[in-house]
Amino acid sequence: MSGVQYTNVEKSSNFFTALTPILTLVAIAGIFAGVGMLGQIQKDVDNLSPMHVPASIRSPMPGVNTCAGKKTEIEAHFAGDLSNNDCDVNAIANGVEQAGGNVTVGYVGGLDVGTDEPIKTPYYQQGLCPVNVHWHLGAEHLSVGEYDAEGHGPDDHSDHAHRKLLAGDARLGGRCHKYDSSVEMYTKEYDWQHCVGMHVGETYEVHWPHSSQGACNTPNQYQTPFYDGVLCNIDGPTLASVISGNQLHQNVGVQAQIFTIVNDENYYYPDLFRGMIVDGDKGSEITYYTGSTTGTSRSNTVCSAWSPITWQVDRKCHVISASTFDKMCADMKSQRDDMSDDLYAHGSREVTRDAITADNQDNDGRR
């Protein structure tokens, strides 16, 4: 297939997954109708010329952010029920699967999740749109031979600026096997204008949370924290019905793609903001499974209550230019919501142990 394709650049659609009778009483279909995204962009890689991120960008869009505070509102309704909890007490006992897991072909998690099945088509086809982009230092997922504990990277990142912004050091996850200290594009630093604390040669796992409840196709679509975007068009009682009807993973999903950053414009892509790159080997080998939200507030003993959600993870590591990331950060700065808390790498959760990882991995139809 010729050209760079972004799977989150949506076509018009009217969709909502069929829910249980209780959901029809609250007219969910009306909430999620009319979800659409921009027409799909295609641009021939051979015709791309290097683009430099401008030192200044336009001001954020004016207007009212209708999604602001949704996470706080929803959490207040649930009165602590969505807080992190003990993995052995909740996740294992109640089948609450976690992420990020092992996505190596052939791996099967040890937690029986019954009929939970991830979305296995592009999210826009199911009425979901991207509501945020953020990334983690190293890989939260594990793909043996691609990004794992045996990968390599620069070792002088202990004083990264983003570490000063986090409550303690950001935990480094797995690394890709691309880094070569003898090759300049892995070692020559880039003059970052918009991203904070990033480092050439390092591995980063990029996440694009999606939701059928986002402010899709509006100036409020992209939000930080991502929960505000995921929950923008839903209230507490309705979300409770979605969860009780075991439909959360059909309405919330995440794309994940892992990169090693290089200082070389031959690896520039114009739009990393709106979703996973699908071009050539990028986005061609996907593992689908159900899990949870991630981050270092969770571990193999402390689990997320935000589960199940769909995960679509690229099993390959890819090389990408630093300018691609800086362009993405420039795009983030131009959104209506303040996304500055996502302009740096977040710490990586440890890879989930078998007992809290779902047993429903699908590797492009291969089990």
Image: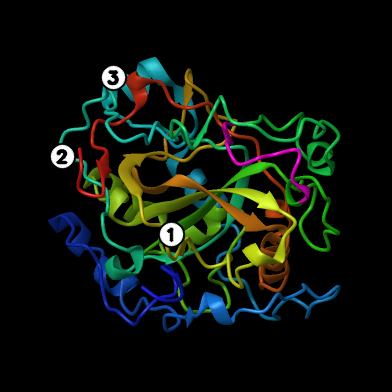
Q: Closer to us: mark 1 or mark 3?
A: 1
Q: How far apart are marks 3 and 2 (CA)?
A: 16 Å
Image coordinates of residue 56 in percent, x first then y, are 84, 75
Q: Nearer the viewer, residue 286 or 230?
A: 286
Q: Closer to us: mark 3 or mark 2?
A: 2
Q: In which quarter of the image is residue 46?
A: bottom right
Magenta stretch: includes residue 86: no
Image coordinates of residue 78 in percent, x first then y, are 43, 41
Write down the residue under mark 3: 93
Label ID, residue 210: 1
Write down the residue under mark 2: 115
Left or right: 264 in relation to 132? right
Q: In which quarter of the image is the C terminus?
A: top left
Image coordinates of residue 276 in percent, x first then y, are 47, 60
Q: Distance between the residues labelled 1 and 3?
A: 28 Å
What range is drawn magenta here?
173-184
Check disc 3 and give the amino acid type.
Ala
Q: Is the magenta stretch mostly helix, strand or loop?
A: loop
Image coordinates of residue 299 in percent, x first then y, are 52, 24
Q: How crowded is mark 2: few (under 14 residues within 10 Å), some or many (20 or more)?
A: few
Residue 59 appears anywhere in the view: yes
Mark 3 or 2, nearer chain start:
3
Check disc 2 and give the amino acid type.
Thr
Q: How far apart are marks 1 and 2 (CA)?
A: 22 Å
Mark 1 or 3, nearer chain start:
3
**From what the image shows, is residue 316 above or below residue 5?**
above
Residue 308 appears anywhere in the view: no
Q: Residue at point 52% right, 61% down?
A: 229
